[in-house]
Structures are given as C-alpha cells and as structure tokens.
Amino acid sequence: MIVKMIVCDIDGTLVTDKEKKIPTANIEVLKKAQAMGILVTIASGRVPSSLSDYATTLGILEHCPYVIGSNGGAVLNLKTKEYVYDEIISYQDTLWAINIVREFGHDFYLAPLNEQEAYVSQASIIKDDLFLFRNTDIKAIVLDWNEIPQMRKVVISCHDEQKQNWLRQQIAVSKTLRTEVTGYGFIEIIPKNVNKWQGILKLIEVLKHKENCHLDSDEIMCFGDQMNDYEMIKNSKYGIALANATPQLKEVAFAVTEKDNNAAGIADYLYKTILK
C-alpha cells in the first residue's frame, strides 16, 4: 500500500458530531503521517476559507497549503489566499435554480464568491439551522432579487426524502447543474462537473505545476462518510468509509473503519495500516 496523500472530509469524518472538533488521536496520526512525508489535506462541502482553522490544527500549511472546498468546486491556497481552481454557477443557471427552489417552497442560501458573505432567502434563516455559517464571521445578507451575484452553490435544508427526490428530478433536466445530498438534511445545487474527486485531480495538477510535487491518483487515500464523498471514495484506490458512513458509500469503499468519527476512526485505521 503506497500512499502519498491523505484526503479527509470534515463533518462526520474528521471531526466529532457534537463539538465539531478534531479528536486528539486524529491530530496526532495525521501529523505523524506528514512527518513521514505523506501530504494531508481536507475536502469539504464547506467554503474553502472556512477550513483554515482545521488546516492549522493539523499542521497542513507547513506541508501542503491547499484545501478543497465547495464539494470539489474550489481549491484554495490558504497561505497566499489564491484560488487555483474555482468553478462557479452562471448567472442564468443561478436564476433558473432559484426559481425552482422557490417553487419547492423551502428556504435557502447562496454561497457567493465573496466568502465573507452569504445570501439568504429571508432573514429568519440567520437564526435557523439552515444557516451553516452562524458560528463564523461571515455576514448574512437577505437576497435582493434585482442584484444576484455570481455563486458557487445554492443550499437548501430539507429532511423529507420525497421532497428531496422532487427537487433532484427538477434539477436533473439541467445540462450544467446537478444536486448533491451532503447529509444532515442539506441539498446543494452545484455545477454538474463538480465533485470531490475532480477537486482532488485538480489539486494533483496544481501540486505538479506549482510545487513540483508529482503524485499519481492511485497514491491517494480518502476518508468520507456521506454521499457527497461518493466519487472520491469510489474512484480513489484507497477510498475509506467511516463506520458511520452511508450504506452506499460502504459498498464502493476499499475498506471501512472499525470505529466511527466520534471515536477517531481515521486514527484507528491509519495506525492499523500504513502507520502500524
């Protein structure tokens, strides 16, 4: 088993469910991996700039300053603040998607290119669980329908599976957009070509051309738990599903951890395999 880079999802994978903190065992094992020359990075559905604290905790900036955010739609150099890859939704597609979501009847928010802001469909969302950035410094702005900026994604909160399926069917007719169920009742509308595995492939290219670091795609180990991790778990040679992962993810995984995210499943697996 030759592994030169480890890629970790955050929620439900790297961090605990309640406190959203990285278990000490995960921090220690990932720092040990980096000391051995293995690169470590994060691939999350969150906006890239919000990953800085986790990256700092893991010591990633000292070895690989790049993180993958927006479910693979953006790769950010946290040191220089440069986006080396950034996939956005066109203005026309944003309007089309928003109109469908309004018909859907659920509140939503939009993630613009300016990551210090988030546009919400109505003010009440700011105090609701839908507003994912409520614990950050990101400013929530009620959307002005006459001034819609460029967006990376549209996010909707819906726990009703039947309603989720309706929305996914409506978006499925688009040639440029698709839906991603990220878990915890959230659905994202994102560019069709965006997924975490594509984000990883973009990062491999960046490392080659900007850092003179040559990696093969079969030297990547990925950890995930939800369906927005599906492509990277299925396509990476060593796609590892957490014990708490969805059944669909476990089916395509190279292996499944014995412990879940709350019990530092990543550390347990790495200590029993490449770091034993």
Image: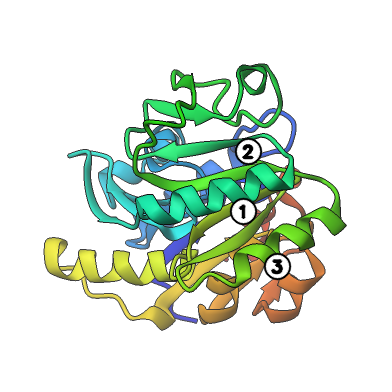
Q: Mark 3 or mark 2: name the one nearer the start of the chain.
A: 2
Compute the Cα span from label 1 to label 3.
39 Å
**Circles 3 and 2 in contact, beta carbons < 8 Å:** no
Residue at horizontal 41%, vertical 78%? 219
**Circles 2 and 1 in contact, beta carbons < 8 Å:** yes
Is residue 54 among the parts visible in the rendering? yes
Residue kind at label 3, given as amino acid type: Gln
SS type, badge 1:
helix
Image coords of residue 5 (percent x, y):
40, 66
Q: Are there few (<14), some (14-19), or many (20+) residues within 10 Å of tag 2?
A: some
Q: Mark 2 or mark 1: name the one nearer the start of the chain.
A: 2
Compute the Cα span from label 3 to label 2.
38 Å
Q: Are there few (<14), some (14-19), or many (20+) residues within 10 Å of tag 1?
A: many
Residue at horizontal 71%, vertical 71%? 249
SS type, badge 2:
loop
Residue kind at label 2, given as amino acid type: Pro
Find disc 1 in the rendering and name its residue.
Answer: 267
Find disc 3 in the rendering and name its residue.
Answer: 169
Quarter of the C terminus within the rendering: bottom right
Image coords of residue 41 (percent x, y):
41, 54
Residue at horizontal 40%, vertical 45%? 151
Find disc 2 in the rendering and name its residue.
Answer: 23
